[in-house]
Image (spheres, rainbow, N blue to C red):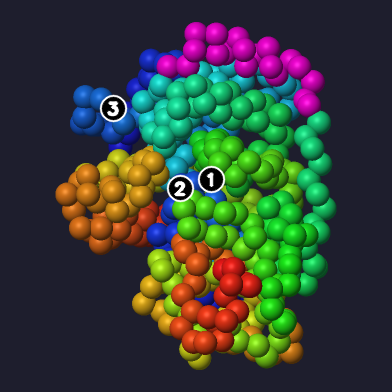
């Protein structure tokens, strides 16, 4: 089933242009890898990028640049370190990222039913991480300083009556106060990039946040 | 509608210019010739084709990267890496899926992001591309798309063209771009949105 919640055009253009911070780029990429509609939009952006690249005034390379390149292509291709085989579980949406694979291996239980796996730190207070919440559980009531980008990798959650399924994307800004709840029989795993740690709005969150550290 | 002109830095390429274009012509390179160079590399390790591609794209890739805030030294090295990747991965280039400039832009972009992330991502062709519906005339269309996009970019209202160029080739967040242009952020975003909508409509009409 194709996703029903998509990134804004702004995020897709920024992704195609390569201007997103690594964490945000990763969350958008996870959606795009599973959404034909957004892939077409990114391709348009890449075509625009190519056309703009082609029209850029050239910037002089070093005088020996071509000679160096011609010498380099004669050398045998160094064996690229093999890409690790997809280590994340097969029932997640298809998205190959060494950073996510490495994070998954580092996952740690943060609360009953909840594990967190940091992917990237920064810039600044931004954090990118995988969050797993067991079936039937809710993330304590909270809001965000800045934006939080989310792509569902497995399972589903309900956010204020809106169902987010595998591949779905969400952009929660600082106007959002919510208590996302995992629906269905299955755990829910999301890839998340937040500009800043979430702000707990109830006592449960305030108690657990020091352990969860998101 | 178009007149043929030659670009001084890359005399082997046919370039196209709109009549009455400004003194510094917005040159638009024809897709198939550049694509054919990559195919020549893939099929017979054509070093002349590589040199032509290098002369055309390496200085532009360097310009793209320095605009995004990469130091000139790092940009020079990444431009080398980009063209080296083109040589090594030429067999993965599919002229039916993308124009040469689109492919090379994506390679340069990914190498730059990888450097920022310090992680190795799949090289072109290392991962199976998602299934797309192939069409017999797709190769021609990919090249035409690029030409249409280039022509449409040239025809955009100046303020939209500027916004799109900054959206791709600036290291500043949109908020800073808006400040620099003395415009509300919403105006910058809506100009980019309008420009992309126009490009999309144009491609859909033509496709």
Q: Nearer the viewer, mark 3 or mark 2?
A: 2
Subunit that carries the residue with mark 1: B
Based on the picture, tell me whether residue A16 belongs to the magenta stretch. Answer: no
Residue beneath disc 1: B142
Subunit that carries the residue with mark 2: A
**Quadrant position of the C terminus of chain A in the picture:** bottom right
Residue beneath disc 2: A19
**Quadrant position of the N terminus of chain A in the picture:** bottom right
Label 3 secondary element:
loop
Residues at marks 3 and 2 touching, judged by CB atoms closer than 8 Å:
no
Residues at marks 1 and 2 touching, judged by CB atoms closer than 8 Å:
no
Question: Is A165 rendered above or below residue B136?
Answer: below
Nearer to the camera, A20 or B12: A20
Residue A107 appears at what percent x and percent y?
73, 65
Subunit that carries the residue with mark 3: B
Based on the picture, tell me whether residue A64 belongs to the magenta stretch. Answer: yes
Residue A125 appears at what percent x and percent y?
48, 58
Q: Are marks 1 and 2 on the same chain?
A: no
Q: Residue at x 66, y 43 (%)?
A: B119
Q: Is residue B179 left or right of residue A204?
A: left
**Mark earlier in primary sequence (1, 3):** 3
Question: Is A170 rendered above or below residue A125?
Answer: below
- For label 2, the crowd category at 10 Å Cα-Cα, with few meaning under 14, some 14 to 19 and many 20 or more, is many
Q: Residue at x 63, y 72 (%)?
A: A211
Q: Residue at x 38, y 73 (%)?
A: A174
Residue B128 appears at what percent x and percent y?
74, 51
The range drawn in magenta is A60-78
Nearer to the camera, A199 or A178: A199
Nearer to the camera, B15 or A97: A97
Q: Are marks 1 and 3 on the same chain?
A: yes
Residue B162 appears at what percent x and percent y?
27, 44
């Amino acid at each position: 089933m194709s996703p029903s919640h998509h990134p804004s055009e702004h995020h897709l253009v920024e992704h195609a242009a390569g201007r997103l911070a690594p964490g945000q780029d990763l969350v958008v990429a996870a959606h795009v890898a599973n959404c034909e509609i957004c892939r077409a939009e990114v391709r348009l952006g890449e075509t625009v990028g190519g056309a703009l690249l082609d029209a850029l005034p050239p910037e002089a390379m070093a005088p020996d640049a071509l000679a160096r390149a011609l010498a380099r292509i004669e050398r045998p291709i160094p064996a690229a370190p093999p890409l690790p085989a997809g280590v994340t579980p097969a029932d997640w949406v298809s998205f190959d990222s060494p950073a996510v694979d490495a994070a998954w291996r580092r996952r740690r239980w943060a609360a009953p039913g909840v594990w967190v796996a940091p992917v990237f730190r920064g810039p600044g207070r931004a954090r990118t991480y995988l969050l797993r919440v067991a079936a039937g559980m809710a993330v304590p009531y909270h809001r965000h300083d800045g934006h939080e980008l989310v792509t569902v990798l497995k399972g589903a959650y309900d956010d204020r009556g809106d169902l987010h399924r595998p591949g779905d994307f969400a952009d929660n800004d600082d106007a959002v106060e919510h208590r996302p709840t995992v629906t269905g029989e299955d755990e829910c795993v999301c890839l998340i990039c937040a500009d800043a740690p979430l702000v707990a709005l109830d006592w449960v969150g305030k108690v657990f946040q020091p352990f969860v550290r998101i | 509608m178009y007149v043929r002109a030659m670009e001084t830095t890359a005399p082997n390429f046919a370039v196209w210019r709109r009549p009455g274009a400004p003194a510094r012509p917005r040159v638009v390179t024809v897709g198939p010739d550049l694509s054919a160079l990559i195919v020549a590399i893939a099929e017979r390790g054509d070093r002349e084709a590589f040199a032509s591609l290098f002369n055309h794209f390496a200085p532009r890739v360097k310009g793209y990267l320095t605009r995004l805030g990469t130091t000139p030294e790092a940009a020079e090295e990444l431009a080398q890496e980009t063209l080296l990747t083109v040589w090594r991965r030429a067999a993965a280039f599919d002229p039916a899926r993308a124009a040469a400039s689109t492919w090379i832009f994506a390679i340069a972009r990914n190498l730059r992001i990888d450097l920022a992330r310090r992680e190795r991502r799949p090289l072109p062709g290392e991962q199976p591309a998602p299934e797309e519906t192939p069409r017999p005339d797709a190769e021609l269309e990919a090249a035409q798309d690029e030409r249409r996009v280039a022509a449409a970019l040239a025809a955009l209202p100046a303020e939209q063209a500027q916004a799109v160029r900054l959206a791709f080739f600036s290291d500043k967040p949109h908020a800073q771009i808006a400040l620099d242009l003395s415009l509300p952020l919403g105006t910058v975003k809506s100009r980019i949105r309008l420009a992309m909508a126009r490009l999309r409509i144009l491609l859909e009409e033509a496709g």
